[in-house]
């Protein structure tokens, strides 16, 4: 991010650099009583840079639970800054082809789609009959694609994680200079997961990646399953939103979402909880999710616990589900 000029046209130090300088000063002079200030600054992390109008990258395992496709639809319709869609937990490039098809139906042909990490999973995939044969394979270089987005701006880039963290871990590992610029809002993790023998789904699919990201990301917001796994944000066949998407006069993108929902309901579960659209709203700084700083530890299998000795990150604390439902209905109306 470039320098900000004050009213007298004197350049001021960027926010992140000022924080780093103050932390360095406090660390150097701990013996003079600045130790508590250093600990406080380190615990709070660097201040968040201004995000309005900055590029948005979505990292999604689209093609399984339809909440991913619904989130991408909302972003395509409401976020002009949408700059890139990466696919995670790939299935031979099919998730990327489905994302391409959906974005094309939404008239967002300019948004590139890039296939990301393939973890060898085939479960929870239900769109194989919804991808036209003429949709081509998409590129397979997420690192280059993220570099290209970051090259368009001197400021921050918003990363919205909706699947396993494999792609983000690779970015932070191979391009660590991008870490301070990526403001990451990730759906994943849980303090009180419904099955205490397992990690939350997105963390469980690639535990090493989850541990790496939690340890390395500079600006990290975790929308926990504790917040998102609730019937208050579930869509089922008797939901008004589903009925609206399924009407006879629906546009092609809505018909595709309806078919995707039907496949999910028929093959897996009678409902889909909108984890990922809620995550998108948090990344857009809409007033639906409250976050609190919390120190967390991840076990080898990525199960999360609250621990004072862990890494301090921002985790979701509560959400206004009614306001979110109203927003979601508005984004999917036509």
Image (tube, rainbow, N blue to C red):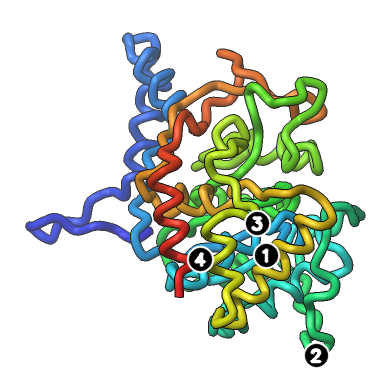
**Residue 298 at what x, y percent from top left?**
71, 26
Question: In which image quadrant can residue 105 be found?
Answer: bottom right
Separation (CA) of disc 4 from disc 3: 23 Å
Question: In which image quadrant can residue 233 be found?
Answer: top right
Write the residue at 70% across / 62% down. 261
Identify the mark at residue 270; answer none if there is no mark: none
Question: Is residue 42 in view?
Answer: no
Question: Is residue 238 in view?
Answer: yes
Asked if disc 1 and disc 3 are in contact, CB closer than 8 Å, the reply is no
**Residue 205 at what x, y percent from top left?**
81, 43
Q: Which residue is mark 2?
A: 134
Asked if disc 2 and disc 4 are in contact, CB closer than 8 Å, the reply is no
| Disc 1: CA contacts within 10 A as few (<14), some (14-19) or many (>=20) | many
Asked if disc 4 and disc 3 are in contact, CB closer than 8 Å, the reply is no
**Residue 297 at what x, y percent from top left?**
66, 22
Front position in the image: 298 or 251? 251
**Quadrant (top left/top right/bottom left/bottom right) for the N terminus:** bottom left
Q: Earlier in the sequence, mark 4 or mark 3?
A: 4
Q: Which residue is mark 1?
A: 86
Q: Secondary structure at mark 3?
A: loop
Q: Secondary structure at mark 1?
A: strand
Asked if disc 2 and disc 3 are in contact, CB closer than 8 Å, the reply is no
Left or right, residue 158 beside residue 112: left
Q: Which residue is mark 3?
A: 237
Q: Earlier in the sequence, mark 1 or mark 3?
A: 1
Question: Of tags 1 and 3, which is closer to the observer?
Answer: 3
Q: Which residue is mark 4?
A: 75
Question: Of tags 2 and 3, which is closer to the observer?
Answer: 3
Separation (CA) of disc 2 from disc 1: 20 Å
């Amino acid at each position: 991010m470039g320098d900000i000029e004050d009213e007298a046209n004197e350049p001021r130090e960027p926010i992140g650099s000022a924080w780093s300088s103050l932390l360095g000063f406090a660390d150097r002079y701990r013996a003079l009583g600045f130790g508590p200030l250093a600990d406080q600054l380190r615990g709070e992390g660097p201040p968040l840079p201004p995000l309005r109008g900055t590029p948005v990258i979505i990292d999604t395992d689209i093609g399984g639970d339809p909440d991913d496709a619904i989130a991408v639809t909302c972003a395509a319709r409401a976020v002009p800054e949408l700059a890139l869609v990466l696919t995670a937990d790939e299935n031979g490039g099919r998730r990327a082809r489905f994302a391409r098809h959906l974005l094309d139906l939404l008239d967002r042909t300019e948004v590139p789609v890039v296939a990301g990490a393939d973890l060898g999973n085939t479960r929870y995939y239900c769109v194989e009959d919804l991808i036209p044969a003429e949709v081509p394979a998409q590129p397979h270089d997420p690192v280059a694609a993220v570099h290209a987005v970051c090259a368009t701006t001197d400021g921050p880039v918003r990363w919205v994680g909706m699947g396993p963290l494999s792609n983000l871990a690779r970015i932070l590992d191979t391009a660590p200079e991008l870490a301070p610029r990526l403001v990451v809002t990730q759906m994943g993790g849980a303090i009180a997961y419904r099955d205490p023998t397992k990690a939350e789904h997105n963390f469980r699919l690639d535990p090493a990646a989850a541990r790496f990201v939690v340890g390395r990301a500079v600006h990290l917001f975790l929308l926990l399953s504790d917040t998102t796994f609730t019937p208050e944000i579930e869509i089922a066949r008797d939901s008004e939103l589903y009925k609206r998407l399924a009407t006879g006069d629906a546009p092609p993108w809505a018909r595709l979402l309806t078919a995707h929902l039907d496949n999910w309901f028929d093959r897996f579960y009678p409902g889909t909880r909108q984890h990922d659209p809620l995550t998108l709203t948090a990344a857009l700084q809409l007033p639906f999710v409250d976050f609190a700083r919390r120190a967390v530890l991840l076990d080898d299998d990525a199960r999360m616990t609250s621990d004072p000795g862990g890494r301090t990150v921002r985790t979701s604390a509560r959400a206004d589900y009614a306001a979110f439902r109203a927003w979601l209905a508005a984004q999917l109306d036509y």
